[in-house]
Structures are given as structure tokens and as C-alpha cells.
Amino acid sequence: MNEELISKKDVLELTGISYGQLYRWKRKNLIPEDWFVRKSTFTGQETFFPKEKILERIEKIQKMKDTLSLDELADMFSPSTANLRMKRADIMAKGIASEPVLNIFLEHQGDMNEFDFHHLMSLYILSALLESGDIHLEEGKMLLQLLNDHQKIVHQPNTVIYFIRKLGISSCLFSVKGEELYFEKGTKVVTTLSVGQSAEELKSKWM
Amino acid sequence: MNTKTLGNLVINGIGSSNGGSFEKVELNGKGTVNGDTECVKFYCNGTGTIHGNVKTGKAKISGAAKINGAVKAEELIINGSASIAEAISSKVMEVSGKSSIGGSVKCDEMTVNGKVSIEGDCETEIFRAEGAFSVAGLLNAETIDIKLFGDSRAKEIGGRNIKVVQHKESLFKLIKSIFPLKLEAEVIEGDEIELEGTVASIVRGKNVKIGKNCEIGLVEYSGEYDCQPGTLVKESRKI
């Protein structure tokens, strides 16, 4: 773990929230337990957070807490929203995937009208990677196949998707706990994508 | 769930049963339940042992109960002594007797009149204590209202309003001189903090008021700060 850490005091100062708010959000599971990193300093014990994650999360909460209740927010940040469903027409309206990507997806998965969470996640990840130009069509199909074979990974926020290429041959893999991976020298990591982050983005589009 | 078809599990005397779904579970003698139990009402008046998790609407423990598992309830009242091996989640929790909890506690409203020891964290909206408590992890509540009657401790305390008062009755003065009533914590963080009889390394908050008989290492405040004489604050800083 070589993420940059930020102390609790600095978080409060930077964002202008109070201890009461921070503790309430923790109670409501808006801030995951494993972000609280306890370290001993010369003043005694202090709590630190992964800087980027906590600042982004607090900004999101502050932006959305007027329109959504804390419980709804907690649902959004929790990785398992199994009851998330969407109609075909909504997918383009909410900007989850463009029409060409949707067609590729349907071609591979068979026609459907209602999309469950797994479908939506697969579609969203496919769309993100295809649109970015990092992967091409055949690789997209490979990704969909892998997502179909391991359906439970979309519920695990720690999962990271890797695309690698060596000598023009590409492959795709999932790393569930986000442990470090080491590749041989000739291997190029084309792109990586965090499932947890995609799930959050997807849910914020859905809300 | 159609509760009409469910029966009751009542053990009067010595007996044991397997778990399952019931309308009412009542252990009056020395009852043992092996397995997870789901019921609408749960009463334990004698010595009851449950080897498994309990999920219930209303639970009342008046005798001695030992639950080797987790408890999920709408309302949990402990008048006797209870030892629960794993986590508790309940809307309302009231402890008038003695209880020790091996896991974490999550409630909306928690009242402690007796003695509670919690091995994990304690998260609740309202925490009211007039007894002794010990929390090995973090005590996190919107409102924390503690009247010190016994030695209490928590590793960390966090919330919005934190208020600790010492009892004033004269009878207690005598006992107090022998057994000083103290609340011990490493860190106390909140918006509005009022402390009496507290020993803490660090207190951080917006408005901090330190009353009598405190021993605080460092106070950090952003709003108002008030410290009464007869108390020990090594350092205070406005940030």
C-alpha cells in the first residue's frame, strides 16, 4: 500500500465537515471501515485515510446529500445493489452505453429488454473500455465472455480488470483482491479498470 | 413469512431443542437450543443457551443467557445477565443487568443502566449510559450522554454531542473517594464536547468544555474552549 494518506484533521479542514458528520457517515457505511488507517504518531494515535478516495467520496456525499437520503447514498456506495434493473430504452437515455456498444453487447448476450445488475456492469465496463479506444472489438467479446464466466466479480469492489498484450496477442484477467501483479518484460499492460469505481459511476448515473 | 403456521418453542425445566422458525421462544428453566433460531418473540427467564444465531422481533433476557452467535432484533432488553459471542444489531437496546458482547453492536438507540462490555465497536444514534461500560473499539454515536456511576472506558469516542457528567449525590462522594469514577478513552472527537471525570490523551472538537476531575493530554478546538479549575489539561490548542 503506497497510497498517499491524509490525517483526519486535514480532511476536516480541507472539506469543512465536522467530526459529527464524519462519524455519522461512518455509521451509515458511507465511508468504509477499511479506509480508517490507524497509525501512531508523536501525539498519540491518529486516524488516516487514503487521500484521493476520501476526498472524492466526501465531495460526492456533499454534492448529493441534498437530493438523496443518507440511506440511499449508502446503497449507492455499497457494491452490492442486486436489485438494480434498467430497461433498454433507459440505457442510452442515461448515458450508460452508446447504441453501437449496446448492439455489440446484445449480439453477444442475446436479445434482452430488461438488464439486471450484472448485465449493466458488463455493459458499462465494455462501453468504458471500447470508448476509450484501449481495446478493440474482439477483445471486448473476450471480456464479456470472462465476465459471464465469473459473474460474482461485479459484486466485489476490490476487483481490478487488466488487459495485457504481448507480441500482438491480447489477454484479459481479473485480480480480485487488488494484490500486486508482476508481468514479464515483453508484456504490455494496456489498461486497468477498477470494478468498484465502475459500479459507483454506474449507480450515480442510475440515481 | 406467514407466522400463523409457526408454533412456539417453550422449555420449562431442563430440555434441549433444535433451532428453527417459531412464533415465540421461551426458555424458563435450563434450556438449550442447538441451531439458528428465528422468532417473533424471544424470552429467556432461566438459564438459556443458544448455539447459533438469533433473529427476532422482541427479545427479553431476564435470566442468564448465553448466545454463541449473533443477535438481530428490533428490540433487545437485557435485565439479567447475557453473554453474546458475536455481533448485535437491534433498533433499540436496553441493558439493565450485565452483558458482555463478543462482537460489535449496531443500534439506533442504546441505553445502559447496568454493565456492558463490548469487544468490538459500538455504533448507535443515541447512546445513554448510567452504568459502567467498556468498549474495546470505537464508540460512535450522534448523541452520547454518560452519567458516570462506575469505571467506564472506550478506546475511541466519536460523535456530535458528547456529554459526560459525574454523579453528585453525597453517598457517592464517600465511595468515590475510594473508587474514583472515571471514564477513560484514548481519543474523544466530537462537535460539542462536555467532560467531567474523564481521562483522555486527546480531545478534539468544535466547542470543548472541560469540567472537574479531568486529566487530558491535549485539547484541540476550533470554536470555544472552557476549562474549569481543579482539572488537569496539559496542553490546549486552537486550530
Image (tube, helix red, strand yellow):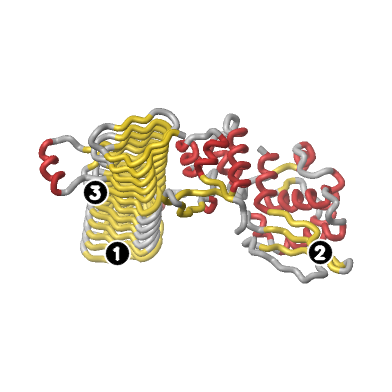
Residue lying at the far bottom in this picture: please name it: A184
| Chain name for mark 3 | B
Identify which amino acid the numbered label 3 is placed on: Asp
| Chain name for mark 2 | A
Residue at disc 3, secondary structure? loop
Q: Which residue bears the numbered disc 2?
A: A188
Give coordinates of residue A198: x percent, y percent.
70, 49
Give coordinates of residue A145: x percent, y percent.
77, 62
Residue at disc 2, secondary structure? strand
Q: Is residue B90 above or below residue B103?
A: above
Q: Which mark is residue B32?
A: 1
Q: Write down the quadrant of residue B209 in the picture.
A: top left
Q: Dot 3, crowdedness within 10 Å: few (<14), some or many (≥20)?
A: some
Which residue appears at 37% of the width and 51% of the height? Answer: B155
Q: Which mark is residue B151?
A: 3
Do callouts 2 and 3 point to residues on the same chain? no
Give coordinates of residue A72: x percent, y percent.
57, 39
Q: Write down the quadrant of residue B158 in the picture.
A: top left
Which residue appears at 11% of the width and 36% of the height? Answer: B170
Identify which amino acid the numbered label 2 is placed on: Lys
Determine whether, in the image, residue B6 is placed left or right of residue B94: right
Residue B51 visible in the snapshot:
yes
Identify which amino acid the numbered label 1 is placed on: Thr
Report, in whole angstroms, how far the alpha carbon at label 2 lies from the one at label 3.
61 Å
Report, in whole angstroms, how far the alpha carbon at label 2 lies from the one at label 1.
61 Å
Q: Is residue A21 above or below residue B36?
A: above
Give coordinates of residue B140: x percent, y percent.
41, 44
